[in-house]
Image: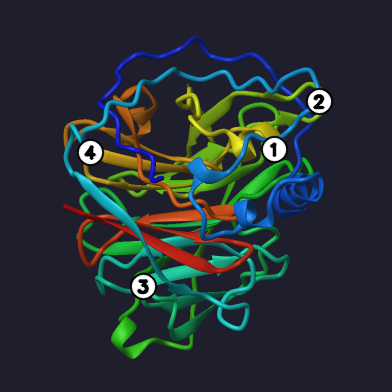
Amino acid sequence: MVPTPVSLIPGRAPPSVRGGLSYRVGVFRAVLAVCAGGLALASCSAGGDAADVPDPVTSSPAPVHPQTAMDSPPECEAEPCYADIAALGHVGPDIVNEVSGMAGSHRSPGLYYMIGDPQGTSEVAVVREDGSLVGHLEIEGLSARNAEDLAVGPCGPDSAETCLFIGDIGNHVGLPDLFVYRIPEPDLDDLPARVAPDSLRYTYPGEPTDAEALLVDREGRPIVISKARFDESTGETGPTQVFRGGRDGGNLEHLSDLQLPLPESPFFADLVGHVVTAADATEGRVIVRTYDEIYEYSADSDADIGTFAEWPVRRVPAPFQMQSETITYRTGGCGYITTSELTGEIHGVGCH
């Protein structure tokens, strides 16, 4: 069953102070362990629905996910009113290996940028909604440590030009900095073989953190959403943090802690934590992916997306995917698209 969109919830829980070991979780290995423990393999299919997956058997203490509680009324009560989940296609390792980031082109609506997270990644793929390849774009000087997300947004304040931002932001080994690469959006009808980016280096204001989600505000400044720490020994998910950097690098500013809604079907959350794996933004809306669910935050169209953690939030339809680590709003129509890093399956949600 597809999770039903829920009404807007303005409330917030107090920030979490829990923490744990910071590392990149192998979701597939955890799911295989559960399947081997007696769950039906059909329930572990990437094409299944989250509501069809049995609750995993876990040892005490029970997992703790400090979030905002939400109810689930049966009707769609906010715009846009999203439709059912549909399988769109597949992206194979010959196009993108371990796809970890996706963003819709503003210059060429209906086409999408994708990137994988293997160490040394140096190119971005351009694909259609079904995952079919348009071409590869080599980024000069890029040898990513752990590229985790892409974003498209203004190149700068009051700029009519849009840029592609490449987030080399994964950090499960405690590196002191992160990099964002910025390039003006190319003409995807005449795709260049190679482009030279601006390389932007950032440092955290305190302890470095892992991250898999990147946004860009209307002034062309990157916003990084951390991947909360999960302590396997206690089952506790720590706080999710939101940071913003300047246009040309430097120190990140801590904006807020993000209190995610309590998951309805915490299959992966109980195994590896209720963590943010991707995000995207458009005017007045921010969409956030976790391994289990998708949430949309909304406000007035002129609101600063750096404040989205305080916006009303609703749960929207989410496919059950193995290690889902991308989400992007559709640029050729209403809705959004999300992809599995492990299987390459692409699912889309349209609008009524």
Position of residue 76 in the picture relative to residue 273 (left or right): left
Which is nearer the eye, 188 or 248?
188
Position of residue 274 in the picture relative to residue 258 (left or right): right
Residue 155 seen by the camera: no
Give the number of the mark in front: 4 or 1: 1
Residue 198 seen by the camera: yes
Q: Earlier in the sequence, mark 2 or mark 1?
A: 2
Q: Earlier in the sequence, mark 2 or mark 4?
A: 2
Q: Residue at x 41, y 45 (%)?
A: 1
Give the number of the mark in front: 2 or 1: 2
Inter-mark Cα distance, 3 to 1: 29 Å
Q: Which residue is mark 2?
A: 59
Q: Which residue is mark 3?
A: 129
Inter-mark Cα distance, 2 to 4: 41 Å
Give the residue type at disc 3: Glu
Q: Say which element carries label 2.
A: loop
Q: Earlier in the sequence, mark 4 or mark 1?
A: 1
Which is nearer the eye, 83 or 106?
83
Q: Say which element carries label 3.
A: loop
Inter-mark Cα distance, 2 to 3: 41 Å
Image quadrant in which you'd find residue 349: bottom left
Pointer 2 local density, CA inside 10 Å: few below 14, some 14–19, many at least 20: few
Q: Earlier in the sequence, mark 2 or mark 3?
A: 2
Give the residue type at disc 2: Ser
Q: Is residue 341 above or below residue 195?
A: above
Q: Do tag 3 and tag 1 residues touch (Cβ < 8 Å)?
A: no
Image quadrant in which you'd find residue 340: bottom right
Q: Which residue is mark 4?
A: 284
Q: Do tag 4 and tag 1 residues touch (Cβ < 8 Å)?
A: no
Relative image position of residue 212 (x, y in whole percent): 57, 47
The tag on residue 272 is 1
